Amino acid sequence: MLERSDFSAVLPAHLAAEFSEIRAHSVALAAPLSDEDCAAQSMPDTSPAKWHLAHTTWFFETFLLERFEQDFKPFHEAFRVLFNSYYNGIGEKHFRPERGLLTRPSRAEVMAYRANVDARIAALLAAPPGDAADLATLVTLGLQHEQQHQELILTDILHLLSRNPLLPAYDENFAYSAIETSNQAWRAFDGGVVEIGHGGDDFHFDNERPRHRQFLEPFELAATLVTNRQFLAFIEAGGYHDPSLWLSEGHAWINANAIRHPLYWRRAETGWQEFSLSGLRALNPDAPALHLSYFEAAAYAQFAGARLPTEAEWEHAARTAELPAMFGTAWQWTNSSYAPYPGFAAAPGALGEYNGKFMVNQYVLRGSSLATPAGHSRATYRNFFPTTASWQFTGIRLAR
Amino acid sequence: MLERSDFSAVLPAHLAAEFSEIRAHSVALAAPLSDEDCAAQSMPDTSPAKWHLAHTTWFFETFLLERFEQDFKPFHEAFRVLFNSYYNGIGEKHFRPERGLLTRPSRAEVMAYRANVDARIAALLAAPPGDAADLATLVTLGLQHEQQHQELILTDILHLLSRNPLLPAYDENFAYSAIETSNQAWRAFDGGVVEIGHGGDDFHFDNERPRHRQFLEPFELAATLVTNRQFLAFIEAGGYHDPSLWLSEGHAWINANAIRHPLYWRRAETGWQEFSLSGLRALNPDAPALHLSYFEAAAYAQFAGARLPTEAEWEHAARTAELPAMFGTAWQWTNSSYAPYPGFAAAPGALGEYNGKFMVNQYVLRGSSLATPAGHSRATYRNFFPTTASWQFTGIRLAR
Amino acid sequence: MLERSDFSAVLPAHLAAEFSEIRAHSVALAAPLSDEDCAAQSMPDTSPAKWHLAHTTWFFETFLLERFEQDFKPFHEAFRVLFNSYYNGIGEKHFRPERGLLTRPSRAEVMAYRANVDARIAALLAAPPGDAADLATLVTLGLQHEQQHQELILTDILHLLSRNPLLPAYDENFAYSAIETSNQAWRAFDGGVVEIGHGGDDFHFDNERPRHRQFLEPFELAATLVTNRQFLAFIEAGGYHDPSLWLSEGHAWINANAIRHPLYWRRAETGWQEFSLSGLRALNPDAPALHLSYFEAAAYAQFAGARLPTEAEWEHAARTAELPAMFGTAWQWTNSSYAPYPGFAAAPGALGEYNGKFMVNQYVLRGSSLATPAGHSRATYRNFFPTTASWQFTGIRLAR
Amino acid sequence: MLERSDFSAVLPAHLAAEFSEIRAHSVALAAPLSDEDCAAQSMPDTSPAKWHLAHTTWFFETFLLERFEQDFKPFHEAFRVLFNSYYNGIGEKHFRPERGLLTRPSRAEVMAYRANVDARIAALLAAPPGDAADLATLVTLGLQHEQQHQELILTDILHLLSRNPLLPAYDENFAYSAIETSNQAWRAFDGGVVEIGHGGDDFHFDNERPRHRQFLEPFELAATLVTNRQFLAFIEAGGYHDPSLWLSEGHAWINANAIRHPLYWRRAETGWQEFSLSGLRALNPDAPALHLSYFEAAAYAQFAGARLPTEAEWEHAARTAELPAMFGTAWQWTNSSYAPYPGFAAAPGALGEYNGKFMVNQYVLRGSSLATPAGHSRATYRNFFPTTASWQFTGIRLAR
C-alpha cells in the first residue's frame, strides 16, 4: 500500500532509535495475545498477527538486507515465499486465504526471525554501506510499512475475536473514550483551483504524488463525524430496508449477507451493544459510528440529505481549516475511487507494486483512526479499501 | 441508465414521427432473429431480445400512459413485474438471471403489447393532455431509453450467438468495414480549467449534469483507437502472462477465468479469427480491437507505456478538436470511476433510479459504438460498465 | 440410463410400426409448445424439449445409421457434438447447462433432422443389412431410450413453466384425475431368499441384470401411496422444522434452499395450491403427494413411524402381489442406493456408458409415473436420481 | 458416528483404569503439537486437535455428568455450544467451518476442562449412583467415541501439516514400516445365506445391529491391499485421464479439482514422494496405497478388471478366513452405500443422532487403519465417509 520517496537528509543515528522503537511497538501490540490468537486468520482479508510480525520482517530482509548486505544469506529459505504478501517481482507467494494454516514457523521462531533481522539492520545503520541516503530511505519506508501493519494487527485481531462466541477482549483497558463527538455544525469552503498531493521531501507514499491542481466547487464539510446516535436513527427509520437510499450494488450486498447494522453491533435485550478491542460494551450514542462499509456510509449520507466528500475536498479542508476528529478517530470514506494522480509513476522493481496495481474498484479513505500509530498520519495520506470493507476503523464525515 | 431533462420546446408533431421511427427500428433489429433467438438469455448480464422489446414498451406504459391516460388500464397486469428492469419504486421485479425462462408471453404477444402501447402513445401525442411539455420530455426520454436498448439488442444477441458452437451470423451483411484505423499520431492538449458536462436544453441524461469546471494538466490523446495488430503484439509479447502489466484484481480475474485473448477472438489453424455480427471471419489487423474489458484496456495501456484518459480529458478533446473514431466505432474506456458530478441530483420518483444508484465500482466509457443508433451520441454522454464487461463494443484510445 | 439386451426374435415388420408410433409420440408431446417453450432450459438438470427431440434422433443416427448404413454421412457434422448427452466414447459433448442457448438449429431444422433419420431407419428396417437381430436389438433400445426422454419432456417442461410467473398450463386437459388413493392398509410379505432382476429375453436395460437372489426379512408394504392430506399433516406438524426427522444432509439442504413444502405447492390465501401440467389448481387432498425429493420422502417416513422400502422388497411385492398404484402414478423412492447387481457387466463400447457410470450417490425409484409412456413399465425397472431431485413425478410408498 | 449398546456386565473397577488410560492417550497424541498446531483447522471436514480434546470431554460432561451428578453445574456455560459437534437434541452448535477461530478457550483451559471432567467421572466410577450398569454403558460409549476422535486427531493433523509448505513432520519416528504388502493372491468364498452384523453383548455401535442374514453370490477377495506400485501403474497408464474408468460424478470431481494422484503424493525431480505423519519420504512401492477417495478406489478397481467388495462380503470374509491387513493398515472402501440394517432402530434422545442421520450418500469402509487405536477394531465395525474423502487412512482391497 505504500512506497518510497526521494528524501535524503535523515540521519542514521536518529533512524536507529526510531527503528528500534517502531519494531518494538509491533511486538508490544501482540503482547496481550496467546500463541493461538496470533496464528489464526478469521477471513481471507485479514492475516494472523504472527504473519504480520513475520511479513514486516521479510520486508526489511528482502528490500534492505538482500541489497545492502555482503554475503547475504536469508534467515530461512522458505520465508521468502511464506511471508511475501503480493510482490510478484519477488517470486512465488503463499496462498493468502491459508495464512492461518501456517502453524509453523512458531511464534517463537518468528520472534527469532525478527531478532535476527533487527540485529542485522542495526549493524547496517551503525556502519552504513556506500549509499547511506538510499539506505535511510528504505529503512524509513520499511518503518512506515510496519506501521501500516500495526494498524492491521489491531483490526484483524478485533475481527478474529468478534467471531468467537466468548467475545474475549483484546485489552479490557483499551481506550476509546476520548473520541466522543457532538458538534454537528457545517464548515464552508470556497471553491477554486486548489492543490492537493504531497509536494515536500519528507516521507510519503508514491500514491500521494505528484502534488497537482484540482478545481473545486464551493462545499461544506461536517465539523465532526456521524455518531452512533445518528446512525441508530437511520436504522430505526428503516434505513437498511429502503432501497431508495442505497447504491444498487450495495443494496444487493446487504441483502445477500443479511446486513442490518454495523459490523460489531449486537442487539441485546438491554439495548444495542458494540464489540470492541476492550470487549463488549453498551453502545455509546455520542461516540462516532465505526466499522461502516462504503455502502453503509453512502446510504447514510443519502438518508441525511448530504453526500460523502471527495478526497480533494477533504484534503483541502485538512490543510486550510481545523476540524475536530480529522485524524486519530476513524478513517473517513470519500466518494473518490482510488486512482492515480495526474503524472503518477510507480517506482521501478518490486517496490513499484506497492500501490499502483490496487488502483481500481476501491475507494479512498482519509484521515487516520484510533488504531493508527502515532506519527503515521498526514493530510495527503490516501488509504483505500473496497466498498464492502467494514473491519477497519471507518466512519463518516458528511459533505454537501 | 438514463434520465429526463427539463427541455420543453419539442413539438409533438415532430415527436410523433420520431416515436414511430425509433420504435420501428427496435423491431427491425430483431427481424433477422427467430422466436427462439429472441427468447434466450446467454448470461445474467444480458437479456433476451424479446425482453428488450417488452421492457422498452413497459417503460412507455409505466411512465407515460399510467400518468397521462385517463382510466388507465395496463395491457396485462403481470407485465408490470415481468418487464420492470430495476425500478424499486415501481414494485416487484422478475429475477433478472431468469429472463430466458419467460417463454410466455410469446414474441407475438410482445408484438401485440408494442402495437397497443404505440397506438395509445400516438393518441396522446395527437391530443396531448394538460402538460404537453412534460409529455414531450417523457416521450423523448422513453425514446432515448429505447435507443440504449437497441444497442443492447445487438450486443446481447452477439453474445448469445457466440455461445452456440454453430457460430451463426446475426446478419452476414452487417458492416464493420468502414472502421479501419491506422493513424497512430498523438494530439496534444493544453491543460487549465475546462468545463465538462451538459449545459444546454437539448436532451441529455441526468448523469451528464451539471456542467462544471475541472482542472486538467496538459495531456496528449491518441489520434485513433488501438488496432487488432497492436493488441496482437501485446498477446505475442506474453501480455496476458505478465503480472506487472495488470491491475492486481484484473490479473486475478483473467487467471480465474482463463482469459488469454479478447472475448470473441479464436485461434484457428489458419490464424486468429474474430466472431462478429456478420459471423466468423479472419481477424482484420487494421480494424480496431473490440470487446475488451477495462482490465485488458488498462493492461494494454501499461504495455504501451501510456495510460487511459480521464473522462474530462476525453470530453475536452471531443469538444475542442476533431479526432477520428471518437464516435460510431467503439466505446472508449476511461480511467474515471463512474461518479456523480458536483451538484448532481437525481430526479424524484422511480425515474430517479435511472443513473445515480449505479455510481459505484463501474468505469465511464465515452464516445459511441458501431451498434449505437444514429443520433444517440454526444460529447457529454457517459456510458458505464464494470471492469470485467467485454461483450459491449468497447475499445481503447490511449492517453499520456 | 438404459442399455441393450440379447433378445433376438423381434420381427422388423412389427418393429417398423412401433418405431413409427413411438417416434410420432415424441413429436405429439411437444405439440402444445411454442418454439420458445421448446428451446428454453430451466436448470442444468433439465433439457429443452427441442434438445430431447434432437438427442433421441442423434441416438438412432449414431448407434444405428453409423453402423448399418453403407456410405454413412451424418445429417449435420456438428450435431454429433451438440446432441451427445454424456457418451465419452463418442467424443466431445456440448456443455450441458448451456443447452438452452442452442437457439440454432431451429425447431424446424430439428424436425427435418428427425424426418431424415426416420426415413433412413425405415429403409433399414425394410431391407435389413446382414445382422437383422442386432439391428432389431438396437432399434428397440433406441425406442426405449426415446420413451425415457418422452417422460423427461413432460417433467422438464413442467419445471420450465413453473418458473414463469404467469404459470401457464402445458395442457389444460392433461388428466391427473384417475390417480386418487385412499386405502391406507398394509400388506405383509414373508421374507426368505427371493429372486430379483430381469431373467428373460424381452427387452430390459443392463442395470436390471443379472437376475439374482437376495435374502429378505419379513416386511410390510403400504397398500398405496402417501396422499397430499397425509403430507400436509407432516407440514402442519412442523415437519420441515424438526431436525430429528431428517437425514443430516437433507436438513442442511432444505435450510440452505429454504424448502418448506413440495416443489410445486404454493400457499395461497384460499389454501394450498399445486402447479401441474394442467396449470395451477387447488390441492386435492386425496391425490398422491408428488414431486418429493428423497430427503423429503425419508423425513416423512420417519414422521410416520415407518421407512422407505428397499428395491428388493418393492420388486418382490410387485411380483407376488397386486397393490394399487405400483405403476402409472408416481415413481416410488426406495432407500436402496443405486449399485450394480452381483455379476453386473456393462456393455462394451459407448453404449456401455448407459447405466454403470451413474451408480453412485443416487437412489433407486421403482414403478412408473403418470408421465411414463405406456408399455415402458415393468417390475424390474430401476430408475435413479440424486437425493435432491424433485422435479420428476416422485412419491412415497411406505414400508415397515 | 457411534452409539451405545445394552451390555451391562462391565465392572466399574476395570472401567476406571480404562477410562484413565484412554483419556491419557488423547493427550499423548497431541503432545508433539504446539498450541498453534492444536488450534488450526485446515478444512471444514477436519477439526483442530484442541477441539477434539474438548469435544470428547464435552461428551462425558453432557451425556454422563449432566445425568448422573447431583447438583450438576457445567464447567463453562458456553462450552455446551462450542463443543457440540452435531447433536441437535442438545441445542445450539458452533458453526463447524469456524472451529479454527476458537483461539479461546486456550489449550491450557481445555486441559483444565479435561482434568475437571476426568476427576468428576472418576468420582462417579468410585461411587456409582443408582444405575451402575447404565453408567458403565455410557462410560464405555464415551471411551469408544474418544477413540474415534483419537484417529481423527491424527488424520486431521496430517492434513493440516500437509498444507504447510514447510511440510513439518508430526513425529519423525511415527512408524508406517510394518505394513508392507506383496501377496497378490485371491481368496475364494462360497456364497449362500450368511449372517452379518453384531449379535453379542460386548460393545458395538447401533449401526452394527441387528445381526441379520444376507444372500451372497460366490466371490473372491484379494489377499491383501493394493500397493503404491500397483496404483502407480494406474497413473502411468493414464488412469486419471481415461473417463471410461471413472464413475461419471467421480470424473467430474477429479477434473474440477485437478486431482491427478493420491492426496499426499508429490512428484519431485527424484521421483514420487509421499507426505506422512513422519514427514516427506520417497514413495515406498511395496507399501499399501493410502489416502484414496472412493472415486479413485472404484476407478482403480475398474482398471484392474475387478470391483470393490460389498460390506457383507468383507465381513463374511473377516469372520471366516484369515487375510492379511484386514485390520490396522487402511480402512477399505466397500461399494455399499451406508444404510440401516433391516430392523435398525436409533437410540432415543440426542444419542440417537450418533449414526442414523448420516445414512445417505456415504460409503462404508471396513477394517481399521494404522491410526486406529488398539482395541477399537472388529469385523462388524462400519466406518463411513463421502465418496470424495481421502484424508483418512483409506486403501483398496479388490473383489471379483
Image (cartoon, coloured by chain):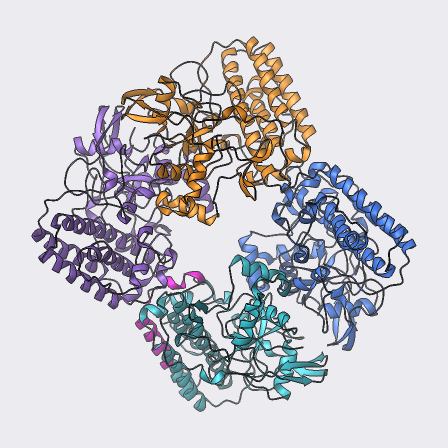
Chain colours: A cyan, B blue, C orange, D purple
The x, y position of residue C8, in whole percent, is 47, 11
Q: State the extent of the magenta-drawn residues as a range.
A: A94-119
The x, y position of residue B12, in whole percent, is 90, 55
As drawn, C360 above or below B314: above
Count of labels in the image: 0
The answer to which image quadrant residue B317 occupies is bottom right
The x, y position of residue C344, in whole percent, is 37, 25
As drawn, D128 above or below A31: above
Was residue A97 drawn as part of the magenta stretch in this picture?
yes
Q: Nearer the viewer, residue A207 or B101?
A: B101
The answer to which image quadrant residue A307 occupies is bottom right
Query: Extreme front residue here?
Result: C270
Can residue B374 be seen by looking at this rendering? yes
The x, y position of residue D201, in whole percent, is 14, 39
Is D156 situated left or right of D254 in this image? Answer: left
As drawn, C169 above or below B81: above
Can residue A3 be seen by looking at this rendering? no
Was residue B291 drawn as part of the magenta stretch in this picture?
no
Q: Quadrant of the C terminus of chain D?
A: top left
For the stretch drawn in magenta, what is the main secondary structure? helix
The answer to which image quadrant residue D369 occupies is top left
As drawn, C207 above or below D17: above
Q: Nearer the viewer, residue D292 or B200?
A: B200
Q: Nearer the viewer, residue A113 or A64?
A: A113
